[in-house]
Amino acid sequence: MPELPGRKVGIVACSGEELAEGTVTRLAALKVLEQLRPGETVTICLPLFLAGGEGDRAFARFYPTIAVDGCEKRCAARATELYSGKPAASVVVSDLVREAGLERPEGARRLNESGRQAVVVTADRVAGLVDDLLGGQWSRRSGSFVGTAATTEPAGTPQLGCACASAIPVQTVDVDGRAVALAALPLIFEQLRAAGKAPGPEVTGELLATVRIYNDVPAGTDEAYAVALEREYAAYCGQELART
Amino acid sequence: MSPGERKVLVVPCSGIGKTYGTVSREAAYEVTEDLRPGATGLVALSLLVLGDEDARAAVRAHPAVTIDGCKLACAARMVQESGGHVTQGIAVLDVYRRNRELKPQGIAELNEGGILLAHAVAEEIIAVVDGVLAGEEGSTHA
């Protein structure tokens, strides 16, 4: 099995600048990432889903992701679903503030006391969701839970692990004349070669099975994928051999 | 913010993974709240990411200064992809290279170097804002 990024939960905050609740999302996310669940969480800047590459867009498929939004526009949840994958859970600060009976936060730049309390409430909720999500069985292939689902709010109702410099490696390959971006393929190649497995039909079967864990291989395309993967793996091994 | 208003928009990246993102955010607040509150407006990048129509209309109607914390330049790219015009794109790292003594640290909370670096960024922005608005005024009276 390739050594892919470990089991972590992704956190995507809206960071909305014009509302105090946006600042609450940012500080709550940072509190979880830095203090409450530092080894178990990772984050990415929301705009990277558009400005980044395929590896950035693979974020919410690789990591069960919690969207943290300041208001009912739910930019983080909606943009994550639109460009990456459906968030596994979602919280909205304005809802949490109401639930907790807090005054509305004020001071986007410097939060007032209510805003600071909202950070604590939001961070605690997110940390609890992280624990729930880590207890579930996440499928990186489908970007959803399989078997027993984690006990979280479903999306749609309401050392810092930064992923922006460590996006999931992606390689684009030609599958029957179509360019297909395959998440984690470079790592899979690396692991197979390190295990001493030379290109050939037997390894191609294993390769396809591993690629399928992290990518959607449409029904009826196994043969085309196998041809492409065998070719690409042979090319990779040839390049590596030439390099040594 | 109405389309006819004479304003320059400030769009920070607010990157969450690095201290430079926090510097971009602090600089934007300093400009829009302290230094040029009437002449500038803040646009949340998340709204542009989502394609919010009001935010897109605002960046199409007003000149924008973007502040980015890393080379991916999310703020500048999102303004451009939203149909807006980036009058000046400011890279926090470039400002830091010109002010090496202002070493920023902290993401949730900036250290003193970070606050001072944000101030240096803000000063560069207001020079652009003043220039843009003076230019607009000149063309109005021509």
Image (cartoon, coloured by chain):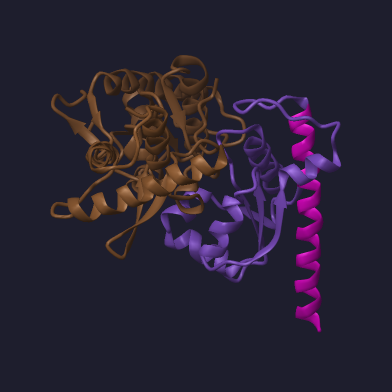
Chain colours: A brown, B purple
**Is A204 a magenta residue?**
no
If the image is split into quadrants, where does the C terminus of chain A sit?
Answer: top right
**Which residue reaches farthest top?**
A36
Above or below A175: residue A97: above
Quarter of the picture holding the N terminus of chain A? top left
What residue is at 63 percent from the left and 41 percent from the top? B25
Residue A79 seen in the current view? no
Q: Position of residue A60 (x, y in %)?
A: 35, 39
* In the image: residue B66, left or right of residue A87: right
Magenta span contains residue B137: yes
Q: Is residue B14 above or below residue B85?
A: above
Residue closest to the eye, B21 or A164: A164
- Who's the residue at 73% across and 42% down the image? B93
Please report the residue visible at 50 percent of the width from the left and 40 percent of the height from the top: A241
Q: Nearer the viewer, residue A75 or A242?
A: A242
Q: Is residue B71 visible?
A: yes
Q: Which residues are magenta?
A: B113-142
Left or right of residue A22: residue A226: left
Which residue is at the far bottom? Answer: B142
Q: Quadrant of residue A66?
A: top left
Q: Quadrant of residue A197?
A: top left
Number of numbered callouts drawn? 0
Q: Position of residue B50 (x, y in %)?
A: 41, 54
Residue A104: x %, y % from top left: 45, 32
Identify the residue shown where x is 60% and y is 49%. B72
Main SS class of the magenta portion in the image: helix
Q: Is residue A82 above or below residue A99?
A: below
Give residue A6's position: percent from left, percent from top.
39, 24
Q: Nearer the viewer, residue B17 or A194?
A: A194
| Residue A150 placement, left or right of A240 | left
